[in-house]
Amino acid sequence: MKDILIMGIESSCDETSISIVKNGREVLSNVIDTQISIHEKYGGVVPEIASRNHVEAISNVMKKSLKDANVNLKQIDAIACTYGPGLVGALLVGVSYAKALSYATNKPLVPVNHIAGHISANYITHKELKPPFLCVMMSGGNTQIINVKDYTEFEVLGRTKDDAIGEAFDKVARVIGLGYPGGPKVDKLAKEGEPNINLPKTHMENLDFSFSGIKTAVINLHHKEPEINKANLAASFEKTVSEMLITNVEKAVNQTSINKIVLAGGVSANSYIRNEFDKLANKNKNLQIYYPELKLCTDNGAMIASAGYYEFIKGTRADLSLNAIPNLKLV
């Protein structure tokens, strides 16, 4: 069987990344140009600045990706790109570049949902992983429990009704003076504290989430008690959101009888959350827990190339009318 090489292009937020992946699982190159240092001084991503930096970086990122993989454009079988969800201006840079490459090289253009990309990062880390499984998608823009029935077939069982978990991490980090990006900084500070502060947990009847309550509680507590131990507050926040995640995952397992749990998205890099899911697996020996290696948790082209591979062999194609959809749903 002929090897299939997919170029994956990711530009949905503040990383310009292009990767070459073989057969959906083997990364030949994964070049990431991050803008964290640019946006750090603003306390978060500035969409217009992100778009401009994507435009400046993308051609060189593509050239380096080909060089690192030791391939040329003629050897690429298809070009996959994120077309949503994300920041519309940032998405348009990647989509436009992918369309231009597709037109110039006469290679198929494969549209990829950014959330499907995060799920697919696990196929790279865990070569043996196959659907069906439950995915806990947790990032700055999304928090969902997804029944991954097949590589391109999904059912959303639960989602956040307000803030995404990554958004809550970023806002808590900003309020307690940690800055951007919030997730890694909260994780680091929490290791120095004790989770001894009682914070509210929102329990839904179904598998949905709500993180606005705990976010507001942390903000109000910090304003009310400016001298509060920030490490303890960070640790208590992590503990509480982890318990909310675990509660719904256990319910999802009971409802579906699926015992494979896959973590995905930027927040899946959080060490406390990983540890709590490992504890869950140790408590329930029937459960298998998977999460991506750390460098594949945040946005990258490899996950888009992997998801693009499965869309490509399914027959998914886009023409040059493909547009960015900032609020694109998985299903």
Image (cartoon, rainbow, N blue to C red):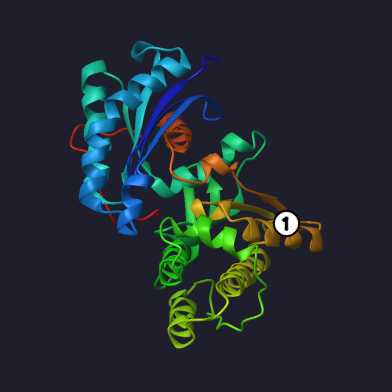
Between 238 and 286, the one nearer to me in the picture? 238
Q: Quadrant of residue 284?
A: bottom right
Any part of residue 246 in sight: yes
Res. 323 in view: no
Task: Give the crowd class for mark 1: few <14, some 14-19, many >=20 residues within 10 Å.
Answer: some
Amino acid type of the residue that numbered disc 1 sits on in the rendered structure: Asp
Query: Relative to the observer, which residue lies in front, 18 or 118?
Result: 18
Task: Give the x, y percent position of residue 273.
Answer: 63, 60
Q: Is residue 260 left or right of residue 151?
A: right
Residue nearest the viewer, comparing 318 with 70: 70
x then y, percent, for residue 235: 61, 70
**Residue at mark 1:** 278
In the foreground, 299 or 228: 228
Residue depicted at x 58% and y 53%: 263
Instruction: Provide residue 282's location: percent of width, then percent of height.
Output: 80, 59
Q: How many labels does the image show?
A: 1
Q: Which residue lies furthest to the front in this view?
A: 227
| Residue at (55, 15) in percent of width and height | 1
Q: Quadrant of the rendered structure where residue 314 is? A: top left
Q: In this view, does 220 lie above or below 76?
A: below
- For the C terminus, the image quarter is bottom left
Q: Residue at x 61, y 48 (%)?
A: 132
- Percent of width and height locating residue 28: 51, 22
